[in-house]
Amino acid sequence: MPALRTLTFVTGNAKKLEEVCSILQGVVNVVSHTVDLTEIQGTAEEVAKDKCRRAAEALNGPCIVEDTGLIFNAMGHLPGPYIKWFMESLGHDGLNRMLVGFGDKSATATCTFALSNGPGTEPIIFEGRTLGEIVQARGPKVFGWDAVFQPQGHDQTYAEMPKELKNTLSHRSKALALLLQYLKDEDNMAH
Ligand SMILES: O=c1nc[nH]c2c1ncn2[C@H]1C[C@H](O)[C@@H](COP(=O)(O)OP(=O)(O)OP(=O)(O)O)O1
Ligand SMILES: [Mg+2]
């Protein structure tokens, strides 16, 4: 059996790393680097690409990074990539209160992976999205906004559902599926 391909995932978030490792288990060998990367303002794609360029320079080699967003559909593209700061300032209850004036409580979780082949190369983007709604917090409050996001067609929040279930339907797993397909196609072209 050929050795698994290794990818270096640069993130400051241990929970993201946990999910990425379990989704890629047996498929890709994940090595992690904990770097708190500077994040610019812009679209998810711009933020992820910029983060990836900085990570590739810091490591002086190939790597992947991702940027996660949560879009309140009633609010256009917001908070989107800025959800981290909204979450930190407002908490779970505050996120619900942001939507009090809106009938539409639907939200889109986005995960934008960027793959760099090394410094000076243009990162490649893979985006996964999962539609759901913002609900009162239910389940453990250990990972970001998991407790207030209930994916469409399910009666549990991300926080309540078993990890294995979240990992089959999440924004992150969909983005990783695209990344894996890309690597597979690239391998096929090389042979
Ligand atoms: O599946 C998730 N379920 C719930 N919450 C989540 C998820 N994934 C990220 N999150 C939180 C973490 C942070 O508050 C924000 C994304 O910000 P984001 O900049 O992408 O993450 P981060 O700064 O923690 O780590 P990194 O070093 O990879 O940039 O949403
Ligand atoms: Mg970040």
Image (cartoon, rainbow, N blue to C red):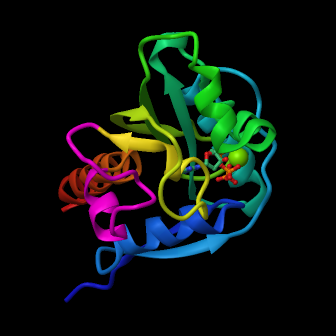
Query: Quick one: quadrant of the C terminus?
Result: bottom left
> Do we see residue 116 in this rendering?
no
Front-lying residue, 144 or 170: 144
In the image, 68: left or right of 157?
right
- Viewer-side residue, 96 vs 176: 96
Residue 51, image quadrant? top right
What type of secondary structure mainly makes up the magenta span?
Answer: loop
- What percent of the width, then of the height, locates residue 135? 46, 37
Residue 119: image location, x then y, percent: 68, 48
Task: State the extent of the magenta-drawn residues as a range.
Answer: 152-169
Q: Position of residue 70 (x, y in %)?
A: 53, 33
Which quadrant holds residue 126?
top left
The structure residue drawn at horizontal position 23% and vertical position 57%, both measured from the top left corner, is 184
Q: How many marks?
A: 0
Q: Quadrant of the N terminus?
A: bottom left
User: In percent of the image, x 64 and y 61: which residue is there?
Assistant: 10
Between 25 and 135, which is closer to the camera in this rendering?
135
Classify residue 187 as left or right of residue 160: left
Does residue 3 sit above or below 65 in this rendering?
below
Q: What residue appears at the point 61 percent right and 64 percent down from the top-left corner? A: 142
Q: Does residue 100 appear anywhere in the picture?
A: yes
Position of 79 with respect to 114 (left or right) is right
Q: Is residue 154 magenta?
A: yes
Q: Is residue 124 magenta?
A: no
Q: Residue 23 appears at what percent x and percent y?
A: 35, 67
Q: Which residue appears at 25% of the width and 58% of the height?
A: 168
106 over 111 or under it: above or below: above
